[in-house]
Image (cartoon, helix red, strand yellow):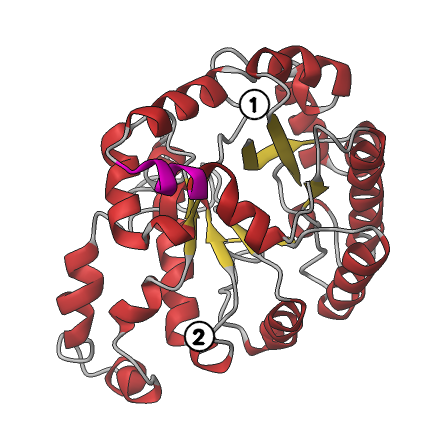
Amino acid sequence: MKIDVYNHILPKPYFDKMVSMSEKGAYMMKRVTEIPMLYDVEARFEKINQFGEDYVQILSLNLPPLEVLAGPEDSPELARIANDSMAEVVAAHPDRFPGFVAALPLNNIEASLEETDRAIKTLGAKGIQIGSNINGGPLDDPALNPLWAKMADYDLPIWLHPTRSASDIPDYRTENRSYYDMWWVFGWPYETSVAMGRLVFSGIFDRHPDIKIIAHHMGGMIPYFDGRVGPGLDQLGKRNEDPTDVAAQGKLQLRPYEYFHMFYADTAVFGSIPATECGLAFFGSDRVLFASDAPFDPEKGSGYIRETIRVIDNITASREDKYKIYEGNARRLLKLDI
């Protein structure tokens, strides 16, 4: 079986509500109307049926994050609609969609904690999704600590998705935006990597050594920069005298390098065998999960699935390791009974 743990959906009840309450939602409507698989379940079947009944999807909400779309008073309602809608799709087609990932209103932490409980206990969510920042704020904000503790107690994964737009951070100080999709091509891997680094230095793995965080797109830049997060970060505090940097390593129980290996990663690298093998070498076969990032390919849904299957079938890995990537790790982490 091929269990695709990271692909996206905008279920229609949520999509309609998002468009009605947010200018950013209206912008997304313009973009996603060209990708019917996002909001039309029948269109999704047209794209995925070609891969056989053994191909199944774990559904997660598409960007933008809820906290970008609505303020802290309205984002909890958006989260409930999103999660209820995804749960309905799963309940209607459990053989093709064996689970979904809960969306949270992360600009309202109390509501996020309540929605996490509701989504997992009542709706059967297999984990939660967070962005690489929360309206520009870092993930090592202590206000998020109760959420990490809750997910560690549930022993279910956290899906970490990069989020950054062209206007958020210009590539050059003399400009007011990022051009030529550099904010996406390079900005998103950077976002993921920095978020992972901030979580490492927050001590999250010392407090919750078994917490499960799936870093999208094979962990961003981390596998390729193995030496920088290894010997490079061993010298943290020697490049400047900032007291935060100088004291950072003394607060951790292990080398920073060891913590980066505690993340999980997925295979959504858009058809690159070298990138997949690099990530697999870094994280190991027990911590890599099959994911396509459908439906954002030129075919609007099937291209990335096909290419990711081609990559996994052709990488240098044992049959046992490929089983883990395709389904074994997902079954274990998400506690699937399919």
Q: Which mark is residue 322?
A: none
Which mark's residue is nearer the viewer, 2 or 1?
2
Amino acid tagged 1: Pro
Nearer to us in this view, 304 or 17? 304
Marks 2 and 1 sit apart, C-alpha to C-alpha, by 33 Å
> Between residues 127 and 193, which one lies in front from this camera angle?
127
318 within the magenta span: yes
The front one of 39 and 169 is 39
Q: What residue is shown at x 30% (from left), y 38% (from top)?
A: 318
Q: Is residue 315 left or right of residue 67?
A: left
Q: As drawn, is 94 to the left or to the right of 166?
A: right
Left or right, 191 with respect to 291, comes to left
Identify the residue at horizontal 47%, vertical 45% (top origin).
168
- Residue at the spot 81% in from the left edge and 27% down from the top edge: 12
Q: Tell me which segment is drawn in magenta.
A: 317-324
Q: Position of residue 135 (x, y in %)?
A: 58, 55
Callout 1 secondary element: loop
Disc 2 marks which amino acid?
A: Phe
Q: What residue is disc 1 on?
A: 295
Residue 285 at x, y = what percent? 35, 48
Q: Is residue 244 above or below residue 217?
A: below
Q: Residue 172, how many percent across, how many down?
A: 28, 43
| Predominant SS of the magenta segment | helix
Is any atom of residue 163 visible in this view? no
Indicate which disc, 2 or 1, sits on the residue closer to the N terminus.
2
Residue 40 screen position, x and y as percent: 75, 19
In the image, which disc is placed on residue 205? 2
The residue that appears at 71% across and 38% down in the rendered structure is: 98
